[in-house]
Image (tube, rainbow, N blue to C red):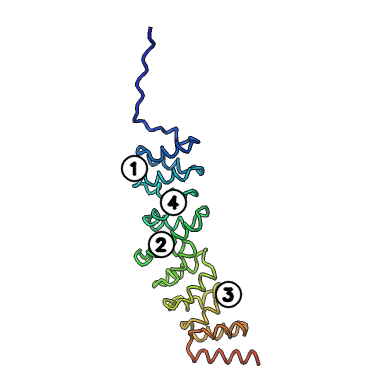
Amino acid sequence: MNGPSQPPQRTDEFPEHLIHSHSAGDLIAVAADHRLTEDLALGLLSRRDLPTEALEALNKNSALAKYRKVRLAIVTHPRTPRHVAIPVIRHLYTFELMQIALLPAVAADIKRAAEEVLIGRLNTISSGERSSLAKQSSGRIAAALLLDKEERIMQAALANPHMTEALLVKALCSEQGTELLVPTVCRHEKWSLRNEVKLALLANENTPLARALQFANELPVKELKEILLNSRLSLNVKSYLQTIIEKQQG
């Protein structure tokens, strides 16, 4: 006598158990499956041992294209190759790019690519978005906003916790766009005390005479001589500074 017949297996059920497989072939297959949901894809992306081929399959899976969380997780996964991550980065939103630039675990070249895309968009995004970026973004993005036309955005960039002396000096050495920045830095309670910043200010034509003379008196003669060689200050101001140098040497 034959036993009870078994119900036929459904072929449309997603093999969810494969997400936990240790087989690279299984993981690649499930990553390419068009039945993969957003939650299951994110679960798969939470695995740090995910093969590169599985990440490539996830990126090509058209069923996942509309899920921004999945796209962001693909970019920030430590094993995602650059040729996969960079094209995705170009299609991310402003604050998704900011998030990538701030994540410690993201590779340096991926962070830089996100920063470059975002910096390239600064002229097209709203004042409110630029203000938020100035306050919260990575130092490199904040440095680009030091030359913003709105003073409040420039002020926020100066106060950004990721701002560094080197980034500020580079902005001060810019040939254009420092009309708002220079006077503010001259009065800034933190940055105006740094010698490298003072030297950069002395090389900038937008530095007020009174501040230029003050900084000159506070700097070593050797550094003052070097900065005057390439300074964009007026001849009148340079003459005052030369007098200070002669006095200090005298």
* Separation (CA) of disc 4 from disc 3: 38 Å
* Separation (CA) of disc 4 from disc 2: 15 Å
Q: Alpha-carbon neighbours of circle 3 within 10 Å: few (<14), some, or many (≥20)?
A: few
Amino acid carrying label 3: it is Arg
Give x and y (percent) for residue 230: 51, 84
Foreground label between 2 and 1: 1
Foreground label between 4 and 2: 4
Circle 3/circle 2 CB separation < 8 Å: no
Query: Is 32 drawn above or below residue 212 in the view shown?
Result: above
Q: Alpha-carbon neighbours of circle 1 within 10 Å: few (<14), some, or many (≥20)?
A: some
Residue situated in front as seen by the camera: 34 or 211: 34
Badge 1 marks a residue whose secondary structure is: helix
Circle 1/circle 4 CB separation < 8 Å: no
Give x and y (percent) for residue 55: 43, 45
Mark sitting earlier along the chain (4/2): 4
Badge 3 marks a residue whose secondary structure is: loop
Give x and y (percent) for residue 73: 44, 48
Q: Which residue is mark 4?
A: 75
Residue situated in front as seen by the camera: 249 or 214: 249
Quadrant location, the C terminus: bottom right
Q: Which residue is mark 1?
A: 63
Give x and y (percent) for residue 127: 37, 66
Quadrant location, the N terminus: top left
Query: Is 109 drawn above or below residue 56 in the view shown?
Result: below
Mark sitting earlier along the chain (2/1): 1
Q: Which residue is mark 3?
A: 194
Q: Which residue is mark 2?
A: 118
Mark sitting earlier along the chain (4/3): 4
